[in-house]
Amino acid sequence: MIIYGHLSKENNFPDLALEAVKNELFGNPYSNDYRDFNITVADREKCSMLIEC
């Protein structure tokens, strides 16, 4: 799982941040599909979900 922290109110947007991460993962040596990573963008204003390992 990848949780991308979105911190800036002025310079970033969650959708844009998510696309940037997807683009970086494209063609990586671990998977051919970014969906294998379960990517989410953390909300700037709220607590994120609980993650248990």
Image: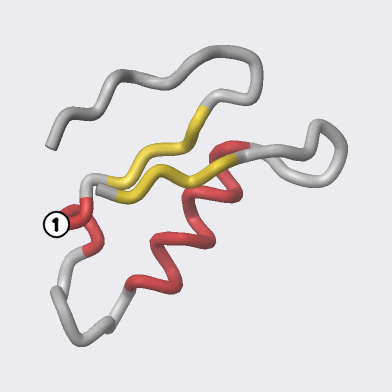
Amino acid carrying mark 1 in the image? Asp
- Residue 33, given in percent of the width and then of the height, sits at 17, 66
Q: Which residue is at 64% across, 15% downward?
A: 45
| Of the pair 33 and 3, the residue shown nearer to us | 3
The residue positioned 32% from the left and 46% from the top of the image is 39
Find residue 8 and report its image quarter: top right
The residue positioned farthest toward the top in the image shown = 46
Q: Position of residue 11 (x, y in %)?
A: 83, 45
Question: Eyeballing the image, is 19 above or below 8?
Answer: below
**Quarter location, residue 46:** top right
Residue drawn at x 32%, y 75% as measured from the top left = 26
Q: Is residue 34 above or below residue 1?
A: below
Q: Residue furthest front?
A: 53
**Disc 1 designates what residue?**
36
Q: Secondary structure at mark 1?
A: helix
The picture places residue 22, in percent across and down from the top left corner, at 39, 61
